[in-house]
Image (spheres, rainbow, N blue to C red):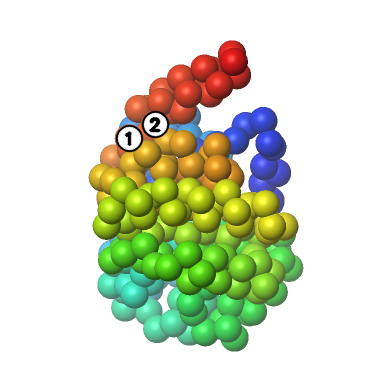
Amino acid sequence: MAVIFEEKKIPYICTPLTGRNKEEIIGELEVILPEKPDLIEWRADFLENLADFSCVLSILEEIAKKSGLPLLFTIRSVHEGGQPITLTEEQKVQLLSDVCKSDAISLIDYEVSNNPEYIRELRRVSQLHGKQLILSYHNFNCTPKNEEIMKKLFLAEFYGADIAKAAVMPETKDDVLRLLQITNNVEESMDIPLITMSMGSLGVLSRIIGWTYGSFLTFGSGVEASAPGQVPIRKLKQLIAMTKEEMDAK
Ligand SMILES: O=C1C[C@@](O)(C(=O)O)C[C@@H](O)[C@@H]1O
């Protein structure tokens, strides 16, 4: 089922699972669930036996049953900061398509830099099965020029994504400001929801206040962070709640 995101609940908080096998993943869930994230992301590129599709589907069902939360399924590419996997791109697209048929998931993530044919195929299959497609862009080295980041986000919209996402690495404080400014500008002119973050220690602020600039979801770590700079979910929720409370009171 597609998730209906409500304005008043923004920012949504998503916590990643990075376990290497079923036991580790279930163990992570036990730690994460009491913290009440809004969504769970399964970073399946961390799984040891990703090539065993039926194992992947059974873990998915277990996560959904245990959590009762909307589930985002991601196999992050190595070229955008993911773990090395043994699947070819074609096999990966096949797995993502199979996953779309499962009632256990609500969203999938795929990089906007991938072959347009694969992107179109995943758009078609996800739509057919009522799943939302996030088209994402990651840069773990730097924060590219504004035009380049904006181009990726608009490209995601062009391909028919339900959500556009960009995660970039700041080298200076100014890079963090630029990312927030881009978020603010793009959110006003785009018809789909946007998720952005600046990574690393400099980028922490963007994960806490990005929603005030138009990023509707933020990632808070559970047992292990899936990207540099993620704030542990409990702290992230507290910081956002305090900020919101003060803003609402003024
Ligand atoms: O795309 C993202 C965002 C992210 O890279 C982050 O910086 O929080 C973490 C990833 O797990 C997720 O897929």
Q: Is residue 24 left or right of residue 17?
A: left
Residue of label 2: 236
Q: Position of residue 104 (x, y in %)?
A: 58, 52
- The single residue placed furthest to the top in the displayed view is 249
* Type of amino acid at the residue the image marks with label 1: Pro
SS at circle 2: helix
Q: Is residue 183 left or right of residue 83?
A: right
On the question of residue 185 being in view, the answer is yes
Q: Position of residue 148 (x, y in %)?
A: 48, 71
* Type of amino acid at the residue the image marks with label 2: Leu
Residue density around tag 2, few if under 14, some if 14–19, many if 20 or more, within 10 Å: many
Marks 1/2: CA–CA distance:
6 Å
Residue of label 1: 232
Residue at position x 73%, y 68% from top? 128
Residue at position x 58%, y 83% from top? 116
Q: Position of residue 91 (x, y in %)?
A: 46, 81
Position of 41 relative to 169 (above/below):
above
Q: Is residue 44 left or right of residue 135?
A: left
> What quarter of the picture does the C terminus occupy?
top right
Residue at position x 53%, y 17% from top? 245
Residue density around tag 1, few if under 14, some if 14–19, many if 20 or more, within 10 Å: some
Label 1 with label 2: CB-CB less than 8 Å:
yes
Which of the two residues, 147 or 118, is positioned nearer the viewer here? Answer: 147
* Figure quadrant of residue 47: bottom left
Q: Position of residue 108 (x, y in %)?
A: 55, 61
Q: Which mark is residue 181?
A: none
Position of 69 relative to 131 (above/below):
above
SS at circle 1: strand
Residue at position x 61%, y 62% from top? 133
